[in-house]
Amino acid sequence: MQKQPERTGDKGIQLICQFEGLKLERYRDAVGLWTIGYGHLILKEEMEKLTKITTGEAKDLLRRDLKRTEDGVKKLLNQPATQAQFDALVSFAFNLGVGNLKKSTLLKKFNVGDVQAAALQFKSWNKAGGKVLSGLTRRREAEMKLFLG
């Protein structure tokens, strides 16, 4: 039996960093949430501290956020994933939240072993605030390509 990946691989981290981008000053994301670094959502208790960060601090935040996302994804998988599949699912959950992955048809299809049908589901998740965003469309296509390895 295939061993489940424990951590996001290099290709997954590259994909996440590419699409999140690096912002060393806090900003509002596409739906108005305060964000910094590589897509770190700033918590209420972090608001005063996280106005500006260094590249090193951004990487530390990313590692912390990735661990939380990886742990969430691992709990949802009923089927063993390849490293590429795991990386794509972590990128998806990092961007949209583990809760959205949990309720997705993508996860349901994957967990019954229908990898091809699961891959096609990435395309459905390209909206923010009800609007199709080209950046999300590109990200979902990249995740789907990685997922299919």
Image: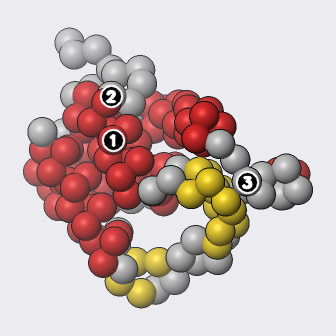
- Residue 51, position as x, y percentages in the image: 77, 57
Image check: 49 left or right of 108? right
Q: Disc 2 on helix, strand or loop?
A: loop
* First reached walking from the N terminus: tag 3 or tag 1: 1
Q: CA distance from mark 1 to mark 2?
A: 9 Å
At which x and y percent is residue 22? 50, 53
Of residues 10 and 4, which is closer to you in this image?
10
- Location of the C terminus by quadrant is top left
Residue in the image at 58% along x and 41% along y: 55
The crowding category of the residue bearing disc 1, from other C-alpha atoms within 10 Å (few below 14, some 14 to 19, many at least 20), is: some
Disc 1: which residue: 14
Q: Real-space Cα distance between discs 2 and 3?
A: 28 Å
**Label 3 with label 1: CB-CB less than 8 Å:** no
**Residue assigned mark 3:** 52
> Residue 9: which numbered mark, if any?
2
Q: Give the residue type at disc 1.
A: Gln
Q: Which amino acid type is shown beneath numbered disc 2?
A: Gly
**Snapshot quadrant of residue 25:** bottom right
Helix, strand or loop at label 1? It is helix
Specify few, some or many for label 2: CA neighbours under 10 Å numbering under 14, 14-19, or 20 or more: some
Please, is residue 108 above or below residue 123 in the view?
above
Q: Nearer the viewer, residue 6 or 104?
A: 6
Between residues 106 and 130, which one lies in front from this camera angle? 130
Q: Position of residue 56 (x, y in %)?
A: 60, 34
Point out the tag, 2 or 3, that comes first from the N-terminus: 2
Is disc 3 placed on a helix, strand or loop? loop
- On-image quarter of the N terminus: top left
Query: As shown in the figure, which amino acid type bears the numbered disc 3?
Result: Lys
Residue under the image location 65 percent in, 37 percent down: 57
Say if 42 sits above or below 53 in the image.
Answer: below
